[in-house]
Image (cartoon, grey):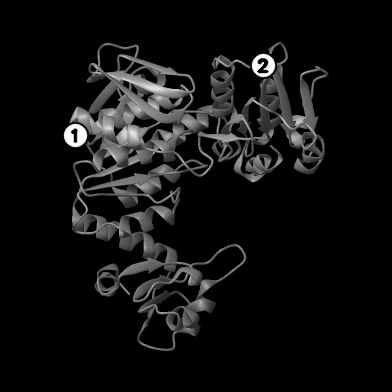
Amino acid sequence: METKELYSYFLQCKSIATDTRKIAPDSLFFALKGDNFDANTFAAEALSKGAKYVVIDNPAYKTGDNMLLVPDSLAALQNLARHHRRELGLPVIALTGSNGKTTTKELINAVLSKKYNTTATIGNLNNHIGVPLTLLSFTHETEIGIVEMGANHQREIAFLCSIAEPNFGYITNFGKAHLEGFGGYEGVIKGKSELYDYLKENIKTAFVNLDDPIQREKTKDMSRYTFAIDNYNCDVRIDAASANPMVTIKYNGQDIKSHLIGIYNATNISAAITIGHHFKVSDEKIKDAIEGYIPSNNRSQLLEKNSNNIILDAYNANPSSMQAAIANFLQLDTEESYKIAVLGDMFELGKESHEEHAKIVQSLVNEEGIEIYFVGKDFYNSKAQVTHMHFFESFDTFKENFSNLKPEKKTILIKGSRGMALERTLELI
């Protein structure tokens, strides 16, 4: 079945589904394959649960006219998404980067939705399946689409751009994330810069942080709309930024007080301001949008529990974001005699894992006024014999020790990769 014919069936449906547990009435179900499953086997079940049509790529499961047979279900989903994007013809903003993608996407959406009907990636559905699903959620009422793109190896961003065909792009930063898949830090820069390559080749516009020398250099000969705090030669000048612990931005004569912790979020906020400015959202509405944004899902959340102030940043971690979180934590002005940090292993670092974990440990050896609890095998294998550092090979052994601490009136940082699930620490406080 050709993409145009499949599109006629898509227009008859109310939504897209790839999981039989989440099928809505009159949806179009795509039977995708995974490492341990073949959704072709669920085709009949999808119809029984309310799907209007099912896209399959195994003729053995075609039992009726509502079974739409294609050579490859995943490719059909991706091609359909590209076709739909072209049919709508709306402006699409793509963003990627090592850290802060989802927070920045949410901020951009909050700002632009003050003036436009926007549709953005839900959560972090930012891969070869999530991007097509985001594009297919756009409607004729959507005025601006915002697409988050994630990647852990070369050519992935280029492929996602070939589907989304963005008019604008933004890279949050180049950090030490997914080093194993990208082949080191230089590989990260090359892989993420595939967004710039697409924009340049297609004469589209990049939003660029001129305070980042790598991004400044990579975009110097392409269409760009820029912002900076330290660099005056830009389109949008951010006057100042501070965080104690919430980020405050001084912009165009006004203070914008966010609910985001960590000075590293200043760039994310500045990008949202810049993109709002480019799309002619008023300064008043930009301020209202940023001040009204409340982070969730373990991302830079400030919580209170049993007299303790807790910075919960347990959604993800890599060497760059870990160092930024620690630096911000150390500079916070607090009244207590010492702070507490619970730091979990950083995943997907490959052969550089031991070195990167050891760097984090060594950077804290001489710090005073802080008790640090390292959780996970990688930190445990990098342990140092220092009185204010405690190392635990697993969360269970950490739990046995930390449960007896019962901190009061302390400021506590919780930071680690998603797989560590360090939000469980909240139960111990």
Q: Earlier in the sequence, mark 2 or mark 1?
A: 1
User: Where's residue 384, x and y in %?
Assistant: 80, 20
| Residue placed under numbered mark 2 in the picture | 363
Question: Are dots 2 and 1 in contact, CB under 8 Å?
Answer: no
In depth, the one of 289 and 391 nearer the eye is: 289
Q: Which residue is found at the position 51% from the left and 34% from the top?
A: 300
| Residue placed under numbered mark 1 in the picture | 281
In depth, the one of 10 and 183 nearer the eye is: 10
Q: Which residue is found at the position 36% from the left and 28% from the top?
A: 269
Q: In which quarter of the view is residue 416 placed?
A: top right
* Above-or-below relation of 335 to 273: above
Q: Which residue is found at the position 39% from the left and 19% from the top?
A: 212
Q: Is residue 275 visible?
A: no
Looking at this view, name the residue that lies furthest to the bottom.
64
| Badge 2 density bin: few <14, some 14–19, many ≥20, Cα 10 Å | few
Q: Amino acid at mark 1?
A: Val
Location of the C terminus by quadrant is top right
In depth, the one of 309 and 155 nearer the eye is: 309
Please give the label number shown on residue 44. Answer: none
Judge left or right: residue 85 versus residue 180. left
Q: Nearer the viewer, mark 2 or mark 1?
A: 1
Judge left or right: residue 232 versus residue 172. left
Q: Which residue is found at the position 31% from the left and 37% from the top?
A: 108
* Element under disc 2: helix
